[in-house]
Image (spheres, rainbow, N blue to C red):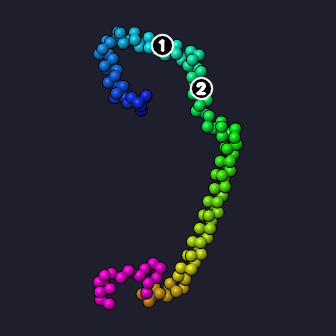
Amino acid sequence: MDFLGIGPLEFLLIFIIILLVLGPNEMIRVGAALGSFIRQVRKSDLWRSFQRMSRTMRNLPEDLARQTGLDKTVKDIKKSAAAEKSALNKVIQESEDALNAWTKMPDKIDSKLSKTGLPTREKKIDKPTKEDEQES
């Protein structure tokens, strides 16, 4: 948890240094004065206008997009992309199903092969090793 780029251990070190320099009584008085100053700044009109300007700048990109109609265009593009992705996934699935239909061994043949000891769907043909290639 960093606050203004200061971690908890750094904050503790700063607190200890301030305590040693000011002392406990003076630290309480300085803390109260600092709190009073921060309260006055936050209640000032300058601070309010700064906050308003900051909010306006933060929302500026969204406001401009909304005013130019860009947000609707972005939504339409996202919707179109989602539809195209769905259609593409459907075509891919159909292609995979068609390919599986062509490459799948029929059950009748598979059961007959298992009786003969020849490779089946479950028992794949091993790739030849270097020793097998040297023998032949």
- Dot 1 falls on a residue whose secondary structure is helix
Q: What residue do we see at 63% from left, 56% from top?
A: 81
Q: Nearer the viewer, mark 1 or mark 2?
A: 2
- Dot 2 falls on a residue whose secondary structure is helix
Q: Say above or below: 68 vs 76.
A: above
Q: What residue do we see at 43% from left, 87% from top?
A: 118
Residue 111, position as x, y percentages in the image: 50, 85
Kind of residue indicated by mark 2: Met
Q: Magenta segment, which residues? A: 118-136
Q: What residue do we see at 36% from left, 12% from top?
A: 27
Q: Which mark is residue 53?
A: 2
Q: Earlier in the sequence, mark 1 or mark 2?
A: 1
Kind of residue indicated by mark 1: Phe
Q: Say above or below: 34 vs 83.
A: above
Q: Which mark is residue 37?
A: 1
Locate the N terminus and report the quarter of the image it occupies.
top left
- Asked if the magenta segment contains residue 128, the reply would be yes
Q: CA distance from mark 1 to mark 2?
A: 22 Å
